[in-house]
Image (cartoon, rainbow, N blue to C red):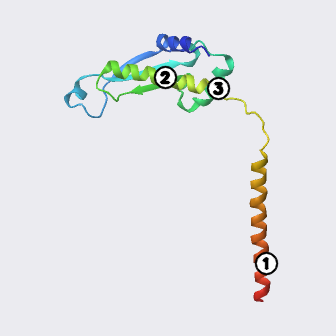
Amino acid sequence: MDTLLVRQSIRNSARISFSRSGGPGGQNVNKLNTKATLRIKLSDLKGLSETEFCRLQEILGSRLCLDNELVINSSEERSQRINLERAYARAETLITVSARLPKKRKASRPSAAIRENRLRAKRLISERKANRRYSQGMEE
């Protein structure tokens, strides 16, 4: 994955809109459009391989709109510019983390100490159960 190309394509292809946001801010909330909304079509993203793109669609499937469009809102701050930058940052991390392919697991054998601990635990449980059987036979 070419993260620089992905970042540039997010910034170039995102459609930006602003609206009024709720929350604290006093009269500022009622007058200014500070909530930033980014809409990014996944097909417009560049720098992803075919497998990364498929994984991105799979992971973000529930967050996508009908046209394979990712919608991100940011309204935490009172500043429009800061909300826009936060939305871009959230989009970048979401896309790069979701598209990253998981590492292949290397098969390994359990160590001798782990095997010994497991067998010791099995032996203790077996002895405990055997003692129960013996003590129940004594009561009858």
Residue 55 appears left or right of 74: right
Q: Of the residues tagged 3 and 1, which is closer to the observer?
A: 1
Q: Where is residue 29 in the image (x, y as percent from the top left)?
A: 25, 28
The part of the image, by quadrant, that contains residue 30 is: top left
Tags 3 and 2 in contact by the CB under 8 Å rule?
A: no
**Image x and y of residue 102, in percent:** 66, 29
Element on which disc 1 rests = helix
Label 2: few (<14), some (14–19) or many (≥20) C-alpha neighbours in 10 Å: many
| Residue in the foreground of this view, choosing between 122 and 80 | 122
In the rendered image, which quarter is residue 42 located in?
Answer: top right
Q: Nearer the viewer, residue 76 or 34?
A: 76
Mark 2 / mark 1, whichever is N-terminal: 2
The correct choice, above or below, for 136 with respect to 109 in the image is below
* Front position among marks 2 and 1: 1
Extreme bottom residue here? Answer: 140
Between 66 and 18, the one nearer to me in the picture: 18
Please name whichever residue, 47 or 29, is drawn nearer the observer in this view of the structure.
Answer: 47
Left-right relation of 104 to 1: right
Looking at the picture, how far across and down is residue 135, in whole percent?
Answer: 76, 82
Q: In which quarter of the image is the C terminus?
A: bottom right
- Identify the disc placed on residue 133: 1
Question: Considering only vertical position in the picture, is 135 above or below 121?
Answer: below
In the picture, the disc for residue 91 is 2
First along the sequence among labels 3 and 2: 3
| Badge number at residue 55 | 3
- What amino acid type should be assigned to the residue bearing mark 3? Arg
Going from N to C along the chain, the mark reached first, 3 or 1, is 3
Residue at the extreme left? 27
Residue count near mark 1 (Cα–Cα under 10 Å), binned few <14, some 14–19, many ≥20: few
